[in-house]
Structures are given as C-alpha cells and as structure tokens.
Amino acid sequence: MMFRQLYDAASSTYTYLLADPTTREAVLIDPVFEQHARDASLLRELGLTLLASVDTHCHADHVTGAWLMHAALGSRIGLSPAYGAANVDLPLAHGDLIRFGSHALRVATTPGHTDGCLTYVLDDGVMAFTGDALLIRAAGRTDFQHGDPARLYQSIQQQIFTLRDTCQVWPAHDYEGRTCSSVGEEKAFNPRIGGGAKVEDFVGYMRNMALPHPKQIDIALPANMRSGCPEDGQYPHKITWGPVTRSYAGVPEIDPTWVATHRDALTLIDVRSPDELHGELSSLFDARNIPLDALRDRLGEIADDRPIVTVCQTGKRSAMAAQILTKAGRSRVANAAGGMVRWRALGLPS
Ligand SMILES: [Fe+2]
C-alpha cells in the first residue's frame, strides 16, 4: 500500500494519504483546507484517483479540505451523520468498509471527544486512524462539542484497545513532534488511559485539564458544517490566466504546449547563460534572456503587463526563477515544465 503522513503546521494536524499501488485508487483522511493545493499536487504527481476524503470528526481547530477535493477531483465526502453537516455524500456508520483497490478501511464509532468521532481501521488492524479519540500519550479533550470523558473511555477500551498490540496508531494531531504509536504502546504508557486506568481515573484526569478555548472554533465549526465549502460556494484561488498547476515541490508550473500557442500573450524569460542559447537546444526567439544569477538585480526590466513564464534547460533553474519572481510580488508567474529539453521533445517551435 502507498502511505503518506502529511502535516499542517498551523493546526498541528496530520492528513493521511492511502492508496493502492495497482489500481491507483486513493483515500484521504482529514485533509486541511489550507493544504489543498499541496495535497492535490501530490495526488496528481503520484497518478492517483481520489475516491473520497473522510474526516475522523467535525474538527474545531481547522477547516476540512474535503469539499475542495470534491470540487477539484469529484471525490466523495465522508463523515459521521451525527453532525448533520452539509455536502456529506458518504455518511459513515459503524462497520462500514471504505474500499480502495485491494485495501479497506473499516469504520468504528469512537464517540467521546465529539459524539460523531470515527476511527478508521485499515485491513483488519494493520493501522488505526484514531482522529482525536486516542492521541499519542494523550486523548482528545472532552469539554466541548458534546464531549463526554466516560464515553471516550469506553470507545478507546472497546474499539481501539481491542485491536492487536502491533496495530499502528496514527492520530489526527500531535503537538510534540511525535508521528506514530501502537495500540500496545498506548495501552502500556498512555498517561490518561494506559497502565490499567479505570474509568474514574480517566474521567478525573480529563475533567481537570482546564484547557483554553480553541482559537479557531468560531471559524472552523461553521465551515466544517459545510464540509469546508466556502460561504460563497465558490472554489477559491483559481488561476485564470492559464492552466497553471502547483507542483508538490511548491512551484507554479505550466504546460509548454499551452505556452507555445499563447506566446503573444506572455512574457517569456529564459534564465540560461547566454552561451547556452546557441547550443543544440537553441532558444525561443521571443524570450528575454536574463541569466538566473542576475535575475534578482534585473527584476525592474521585466514588465508586469503580461503573465511571466520562465524557461531554462530542464526546468530546474527556471523553477527557482519563478519562485524569485513570486517572492518579488509578481502574481502571474509559472515555470515552463521540463524546460527546453521537453520543449524540443514535444516538437514545439523555437
Ligand atoms: Fe478534534
């Protein structure tokens, strides 16, 4: 199975990508709104088809990226129906199976942090995605969103601690840099519910945490009740000047074939050194040559009246150039993916 743990630093949230390497079918667990471009580019670069985004619960600390993925890729939106959130087209109940290729996530209801919390158990207990029910050496707070510490104690004991000890535990958050645990480890060392803790111990611990009110709750909860759909119902930040995609490396890229047919509407900047322009790859006759080493000093020479496309030999130096231009405040910038090598391979005119 293909597996990636992704991280949102602003909310300390983990997003998980699971995919079948043969069928290329994928599932995302707990995507974050602000990380949509990153996650979508990873799916694209790995050649995966996203079947569904499934949230472990209605989050109070960040907005889900589920609706954005649905709008961009047509994927389904999975959540417990307990919240009554809009746009959910995959309501998940205890025992449901979310299949992708030859793999499946089994849905286990684990309420207590909220009343709709779900844990997703992969392939009969290889991994458990526990959301905020069971965290690494911790458990999700139970003091809002219908939280109930006694209920959470029962959920963890009956649905998570009954999995085999080697089952890996992948939570929705960690604030201490920890990434993964196991059922056996948490049964032994979790300071709230491990080591034979009884329900009174757990409830007493959870009732006395005195945590501050979550900063994002007033924004996150209403947005998550729409599955992360913006208030205006529109897919945000769509680039309109051309078919620009953001690579997983964070570079805005554009298809060279589109560039070749729209050259009159673009400013082309070739960032190779002048002696490279006469080699076997030759040059684009209408490109301005500003070598990468000089770009920062010569930004004033580049007009802002048209979108800017950067090009070099293989698209590496021009990727750096696109980032320099973006950091300098140019909003319509993209790198010609693959550079002149790809340009020539596609037989485009130079
Ligand atoms: Fe939560």
Image (spheres, helix red, strand yellow):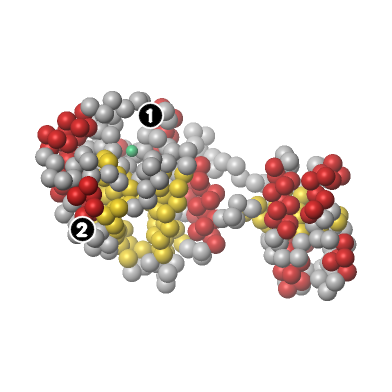
Find residue 165 and name its label: 2
Indicate the quadrant where residue 149 lies. Answer: top left
Q: Which residue is mark 1?
A: 214
Q: Give the vertical position of 213 relative to 173 (above or below).
A: above
Q: Are marks 2 and 1 in contact (CB under 8 Å)?
A: no
The amino acid at mark 1 is Pro
Say whether residue 51 is left or right of residue 141.
right
Q: Identify the disc placed on residue 9.
A: none
> Where's residue 259, x and y in %?
75, 59
Q: Quadrant of residue 269?
A: bottom right
> CA separation, marks 2 and 1?
33 Å
For label 2, the SS is: loop
- Residue at image position (17%, 36%) is 202
**Residue located at (19% from left, 42% from top):** 193
Q: Quadrant of ligand 1?
A: top left
**In this picture, residue 238 sits left or right of residue 16:** right
User: In the rendered view, would you say 122 is above or below 87?
Assistant: below
- Name which residue lies at 64% across and 53% down: 251
- Residue 12's spot in the image, x, y percent? 42, 41
Answer with mark 2 or mark 1, whichever residue precedes in sequence: 2
Q: Is residue 229 visible?
A: no
Graded by Cα atoms within 10 Å as few (under 14), some (14 to 19) or many (20 or more), the crowding at tag 2 reads some
Q: Is residue 251 above or below residue 303?
A: below
Left or right: residue 224 versus residue 265 is left
